[in-house]
Image (spheres, rainbow, N blue to C red):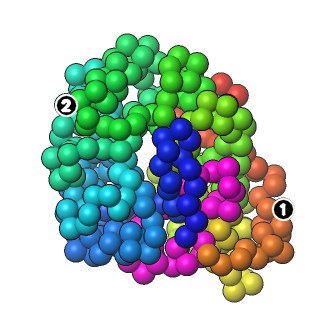
Amino acid sequence: MKYRKLGKTGLEVSALSFGASSLGSVFRETDDAESVRTVHTAVDMGINLIDVSPYYGLTKAERVLGKAIAEMKRDRFVLTTKAGRYGADKFDFSEQRIISSVDESLQRLQTDYIDILFLHDIEFVPFEQVAEGAFLALEKLKQAGKIRFSGVSGLPLTVFEKSLAYTELDAVLSYCHYSLNDTSLLDILPLLERQQVGLISASPLSMGLLGNRALADWHPAGAEVRAACQEAAAYCAAKGEDIAKLAVQYATANERIPTTLVSTANPDNIRKNIEWTDEPIHEELLAEVLAILAPIHNRSWESGREEYNTGIVV
């Protein structure tokens, strides 16, 4: 496992990190004991960053993760969670709610501090609400020793640009913008590097677009994007290759992106993902797959309020 520096935090994080959303039975019904074993396998094999949120499984992911990390030494991993989003359409970025949310997360996670707290999907509320409420809470939480670092997460890259124009951040969490079909995250790397902001990239499979399973009905990608990704997956399968392996290898290879989150509640799956990162990438296959995906390259989808979605290509 490779380790990279996470901006100005000074933290050294594994190139592949663990997203605990699956522990909340977000994608399928999961067994808690198996979920705990998955977390332990991830850390034993070198992953040292774990990300979760009270939104995942409506607090279930945090509760299950709490069981897992209660059985490990706290200095073995970097723990990140989120605040502000509590349901599909339930958001509260007021100062007091962010503070109480962290207290609740600490109880569920069975720990006394969070390494990084992210304000979760801030594009769903007017930016002023975050600026005048949640941002104020972050400093108080740091002073109280409940969090070490803070940042924001969201889908539109403008989330990070607007936030960094307003305040300093220790880290950001971006998803679905550094993968085989979308590398638009590279557009904001100079800004993040200039300000030494730590970067966590999530979902190298683009929430299932780059996989062999049937895509979930709720997936927001348009028909052309779906079709191109299915074509690329079928092409890999016809050559006896797994597009998920190619996607994970591609996402974790870029030294400028410190860590990439993958989520699973299966010990064998996380073991496989970790092993993939240590294997050389199939360069010829990569070129062929990128060519298939070229017509839909950097096409994303809207998320949240219009103010964050200007210029989105769908």
Q: Quadrant of residue 67?
A: bottom left
- Residue type at tag 1: Ala
10 Å crowding of disc 2: few (<14), some (14-19), many (20+): few
The part of the image, by quadrant, that contains residue 230 is bottom right
Which is more N-terminal, label 1 or label 2?
A: 2
Q: Are marks 2 and 1 in contact (CB under 8 Å)?
A: no
In this view, the residue in front, 22 or 270, is 270
Residue visible at 22% across and 74% down in the picture: 33
For the record, the magenta segment spans 251-277
Q: Is residue 22 above or below residue 190?
A: below
Q: Inspect the image, locate mark 2, and give the three-letter code of the amino acid beneath it.
A: Ser
Instruction: Please state if 225 lies on the left or on the right of 273 as rendered.
Output: right
Residue 185 can be seen, yes or no? yes
- In the image, what residue occupies the spot 56% across and 24% down? 164
User: Which residue extends farthest bottom?
Assistant: 240
Where residue 291 is drawn, which disc sits there? 1
271 or 29: which is nearer to us?
Answer: 271
Please say whether residue 269 is one of the residues in the magenta stretch.
Answer: yes
* Helix, strand or loop for disc 2: helix
Residue 238 in magenta stretch? no
Q: Position of residue 266 (x, y in %)?
A: 37, 75
| Residue 229 is at least partly visible in this image | no
Q: Residue at x 51, y 79 (%)?
A: 272
Circle 2 is placed at which residue position? 100
Q: Quadrant of the C terminus?
A: top right
The quadrant of the image that shows the N terminus is: bottom right
In this view, the mark in front (2 or 1): 2
Q: Residue 1: which numbered mark, if any?
A: none
